[in-house]
Amino acid sequence: MIKRKHASGFNAIFADPDKAPLDQIMDGFDFVTRTIIEQSDKDIELNRALGDAQAVIREQVKRSTIIHARSILNTCAQRATGKEVYDDYLE
């Protein structure tokens, strides 16, 4: 779920009447997954500092799963549109 501080940015994606629905979906997915990855990076750093190895591993798995989901959507978008959408975070 998107936290309130991010809701206005997320809502703005879907409020743009000039943006095609597919672009809104792609941008919304990018916004949500980017937010999750950025928070995971912070949580990994915090848990390392706290010495909680299990929490670090859980966050790394979550981060890797989200990155994989982005790569799947990127592949589908590339096949549908002929262009890459998400090139960052892809490993």
Image: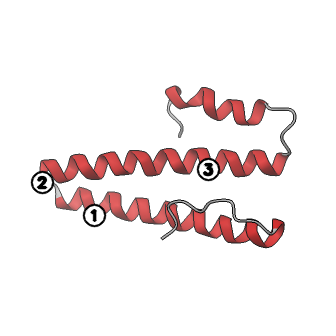
Task: Name the spot of residue 61 as percent of width and height, x first.
Answer: 37, 65
Residue named by callout 3: 30
Q: Earlier in the sequence, mark 3 or mark 1?
A: 3
Task: Name the spot of residue 10 as percent of width and height, x first.
Answer: 64, 35
| Tag 2 secondary structure | loop
Task: Name the spot of residue 20 as percent of width and height, x first.
Answer: 86, 45
Q: Earlier in the sequence, mark 2 or mark 1?
A: 2
Residue sitting at x 67%, y 45%:
28
Dot 3 and dot 2 residues touching (CB under 8 Å) = no
Instruction: Give the CA separation, mark 2 to mark 1.
Output: 12 Å
Q: Amino acid at mark 1?
A: Ile
- Relative to the observer, which residue lies in front, 87 or 38? 87
Whether residue 23 sits left or right of residue 1 in the image: it is right
Residue named by callout 1: 57
Whether residue 63 sits left or right of residue 66 in the image: it is left
Q: Nearer the observer, disc 3 or disc 2?
A: 3
Q: Measured along the vertical axis of the image, is residue 51 above or below residue 39?
A: below
Residue sitting at x 13%, y 48%:
50
| Tag 1 secondary structure | helix
Residue named by callout 2: 51
Whether residue 20 sits left or right of residue 41 in the image: it is right
How packed is label 1: few (under 14 Cα within 10 Å), some, or many (20 or more)? Answer: some
